[in-house]
Image: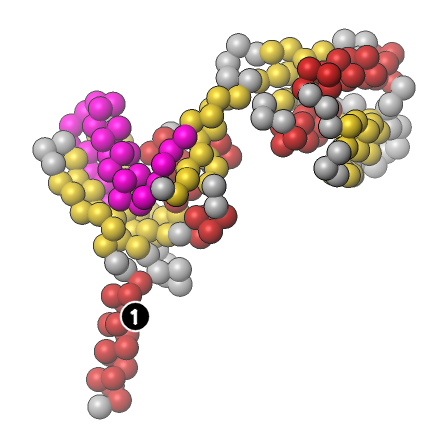
Amino acid sequence: MKNLIRLLIIAFVAVGCSSEVLQKETDTYQITITKASNFHQGFTNTEMTQKGLFDLNAERISLKELFKILLEAHPADIKFEKAKMLKEFYQVEIKQKKEGKAVQKAILNDILQSLHLDLEQLQYKNFSIEIQDSAKLNNFRNNTEKNVSTVFSKADFKKVENATLKEVAKVLSKQYNEDFSSDVEERIDYKWEKTPLAELRQKFTTDLGVSFKELPQTKTIYLLKEK
């Protein structure tokens, strides 16, 4: 009797951890999605594209990893409106039977609909921070030999100590809805107040002697939101 009860409990837990989300088959593709247990271990995920046809067989895959594959995007470019969505895992099987972007778009739309998600594409300008006047930059240079940088982040100002311009660019990317990058490794100490981006760029040019070169390509960020 104890063994029977134990088996029933195991079966109940298995059913509760694997509820079906989507099962669909057409002439051009086949999709099966079930919710995976958060405690599942020893899983295998395989992805293959052959002759333009895409196959995915994932025993346990996160939403970020799933949409990284579907959107062919870098994981850092996929954002979620709610942090809890990062902890959701699914068992997913996708088989593409016919080539074409239209088929891939249909697969994406079916998955978004079944998971009750909206996908928003945000376009960001891309700026490269480059040295224009080395003499000005030298006024803020940190000459210590340490490689550790510090960032003080407040609502009304930012302050960096012993930070490279490459690290400053990352701070700016988080502060403004644009994408900044830099290859400059010189370390500086600098503080700036929160201002409109045009004013900030002018201040950086005046103080640090750097320019903001707008690159032709924009950066796409994919934002997934619950319906």
155 w.r.t. 183: above or below = below
146 w.r.t. 184: above or below = below
The colour scheme is: secondary structure
- Picture quarter with the C terminus: top left
Image spot of residue 23 (x, y percent): 18, 47
* Residue at screen point 87% across, 23% down: 140
25 w.r.t. 219: above or below = below
Image spot of residue 149 (x, y percent): 78, 37
Q: Quadrant of residue 115?
A: top left
Image spot of residue 171 (x, y percent): 68, 31
Image spot of residue 56 (x, y percent): 27, 41
Residue stretch rendered in magenta on the structure: 93-120
Amino acid of disc 1? Val
* Residue at screen point 22% across, 47% down: 22
Residue 214 left/right relative to 163: left
- Taking depth in this image into account, of 116 and 135 the one nearest to the observer is 116
Q: Which residue is mark 1?
A: 13
